[in-house]
Amino acid sequence: MRFPAIAHVEDPRSVYPLALLELALAQSKRQYQLQSSPQRMSKSRSLAFLKDKTELDVVWTMTSIERELDFRAIRVPIFKGLSGYRVMLIRSDQQALFSVDTPVVQIKRRLYAQGHDWIDAKVLQLNGLSVIGAAGYDNLFSMLEKGRVDAVPRNALEIADEASLLAARNIVIEKNWVIYYPTASYFFVNSDNKQLAQDIEQGLQRIIADGTFEQLFNQFFAGHLAELDLRQRQVIILKNPLLPEQTPIKDARLWYYP
């Protein structure tokens, strides 16, 4: 079974979904052999390959109404909804722009960078925030470093590792705020691949029931979350009009609550 090449073998947010997928498929009577694509690819390109049934059999990404129409979603949020908690990377001399006393309306008026094909960018824009789309991951931080944007909102689970790598460029984690909107990242397969979807779904439900899912999640992310202490941050709550109605919001087992 083919999946998109992960960003880096030492990046928890890249390695974790693969570890979770392996655990889920290990519950199946069918034997699956996981195989990485030869090269990294953009999200839009990986979804194009998945739709055409070429090169990829599974992709993990943030959900949307459009994506759930185009693909078969396994509706178990693999990051427990934390994809919707966005903490900002800023230049080290710009913390005053995001002081705890700054009105929310002013925070929303800042200029933000996101990947041009990310669901996140659309959600921010639909809530009235100004977003510049970056063509590549590294461009996000070049834009910030050069002062073209005020901040780069990042997933709460990925920002700590990124900040350590970007410290030499005077890029730091903003201290006071978190942007939140309800969302979920899922495993997606081709719409015709019912058997694979069923095997992933059943495997995930089994490891949720026996506690293995929670153990793996904590192994990768408990330290990150303790450092960020999301409960102490000012929250900017946004709407997510792209979130499908079928999202299992009421199943408390599946979500992280700060």
Image (tube, grey):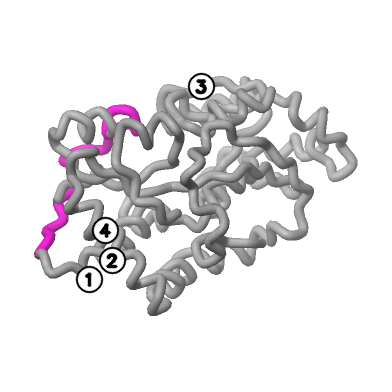
Residue sitting nearer the eye, 152 or 57: 57
Circle 2 sits on which residue? 203
**Mark 4 touches mark 2? (CB < 8 Å):** yes
As shown in the figure, which amino acid type bears the numbered disc 3? Gly
Whole-percent x, y for residue 134 in the image: 48, 23
Q: Which mark is residue 133?
A: 3
Callout 4: SS: helix
Cα–Cα span, label 4 and label 2: 5 Å
Relative to 12, 31 lies left or right: left
Residue sitting nearer the eye, 77 or 130: 77
Q: Which mark is residue 202?
A: none
For the point 18% across and 45% down, the residue is 193
Segment colored magenta: 31-46
Circle 4 sits on which residue? 200
Question: First in sequence: mark 3 or mark 2?
Answer: 3
**Mark 1 touches mark 4? (CB < 8 Å):** no
Cα–Cα span, label 2 and label 1: 5 Å
Cα–Cα span, label 1 and label 4: 9 Å
Q: Nearer the viewer, mark 3 or mark 4?
A: 4
Q: Which mark is residue 27?
A: 1
Callout 3: SS: strand
